[in-house]
Image: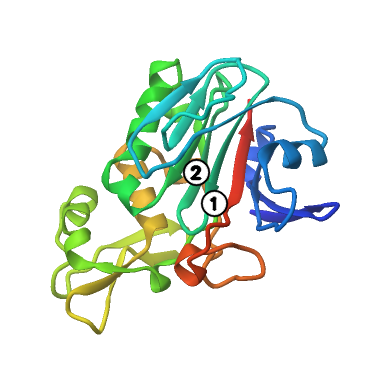
């Protein structure tokens, strides 16, 4: 992914989405004019803007071509309509943008540890299939989030997830390792000095869920920058306990 600047707006774009002519952005943090309507206006774009009240659920909502004046409770949005934009906000969780190169269907998914455990990614892919997409035609951009060495959790909170994703337990020295990109190995789990704690890489977990759904490595584009470790670029809830977020969007 590449970092771009338009006026005073900094945002990342996926090479995979760019090559297939999907307008999109993973925005960095801003203190002013940080709402979707303002960002869209400053980028000289036009669309019906849609976003949801995110609650770490497994709910996926299909968007029609009307304005979403009253956001609904959900953590993933999909649409098959033209001239729409889907927006999600994050501050350590993963923003995931999905596009169908054949139908031009799109999705935007907010995904943290809870969402992965509830299989929000798998359910988003299923809903895309329901509106005419085929998994082989999907391209998926995974945006910046907290990295594994900064994300400490209770072991009991990920015991079921480990088996769900890999069919193995992470207990003892049996840690799952996932090859994400050519030449890059990212541990799914790392042991912590505290016996009841463990570090988890939620990007690795998300990609394992995609692999289980039949998505291939060449369909995925990954931004490996850590939100926690880059305070100049990103808001981070784990780092600052902030209510500020950065937006990500994709246009149909």
Vertical comparison of 34 with 195: above or below: above
- Which residue does the numbered mark 2 point to in the structure image? 96
The quadrant of the picture occupied by the C terminus is: top right
Q: Is residue 30 left or right of residue 250?
A: right
Residue 123, image quadrant: top left
Secondary element type, mark 1: loop
Residue 90 at x, y = what percent? Answer: 52, 51
- Badge 2: residue crowd in 10 Å (few <14, some 14–19, many ≥20): many
* Mark 2 → mark 1, Cα distance in angstroms: 6 Å
- Badge 1: residue crowd in 10 Å (few <14, some 14–19, many ≥20): many
Camera sees residue 214:
no
Residue 130, image quadrant: top left
Disc 2 + disc 1, Cβ < 8 Å: yes
Q: Nearer the viewer, residue 9 or 53?
A: 53
Which residue lies at the image location 38% right of the left edge and 68% below the top edge?
151
- Which residue does the numbered mark 1 point to in the structure image? 143
Q: Is residue 38 left or right of residue 58?
A: right
Vertical comparison of 5 with 131: above or below: below
Q: Nearer the viewer, residue 5 or 41?
A: 41
Among the two numbered marks 2 and 1 on one chain, the one whose residue lies closer to the N terminus:
2
Q: Is residue 200 left or right of residue 134?
A: left
Q: Is residue 36 left or right of residue 142?
A: right
């Amino acid at each position: 992914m590449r970092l771009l600047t338009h006026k005073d707006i900094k945002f990342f774009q996926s090479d995979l989405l760019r090559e297939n002519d999907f307008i999109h952005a993973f925005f960095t943090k801003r203190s002013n004019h940080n709402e979707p309507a303002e960002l869209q206006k400053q980028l000289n774009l036009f669309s019906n803007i849609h976003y949801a009240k995110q609650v770490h659920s497994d709910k996926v909502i299909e968007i029609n071509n009307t304005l979403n004046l009253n956001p609904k409770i959900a953590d993933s949005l999909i649409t098959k309509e033209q001239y729409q934009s889907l927006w999600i906000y994050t501050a350590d969780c993963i923003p995931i943008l999905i596009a169908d190169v054949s139908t031009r269907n799109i999705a935007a998914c907010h995904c943290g540890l809870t969402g992965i455990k509830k299989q929000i990614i798998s359910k988003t892919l299923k809903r895309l299939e329901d509106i005419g997409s085929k998994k082989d035609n999907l391209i998926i951009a995974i945006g910046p989030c907290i990295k594994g060495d900064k994300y400490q959790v209770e072991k009991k909170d990920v015991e079921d997830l480990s088996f769900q994703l890999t069919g193995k337990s992470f207990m003892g020295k049996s840690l799952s390792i996932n090859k994400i990109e050519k030449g890059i190995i990212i541990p799914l789990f790392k042991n912590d000095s505290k016996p009841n704690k463990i570090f988890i890489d939620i990007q690795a977990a998300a990609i394992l869920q995609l692999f289980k759904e039949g998505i291939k490595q060449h369909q995925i584009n990954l931004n490996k920058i850590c939100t926690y470790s880059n305070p100049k670029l990103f808001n981070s809830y784990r780092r600052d306990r902030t209510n500020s977020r950065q937006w990500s969007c994709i246009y149909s």
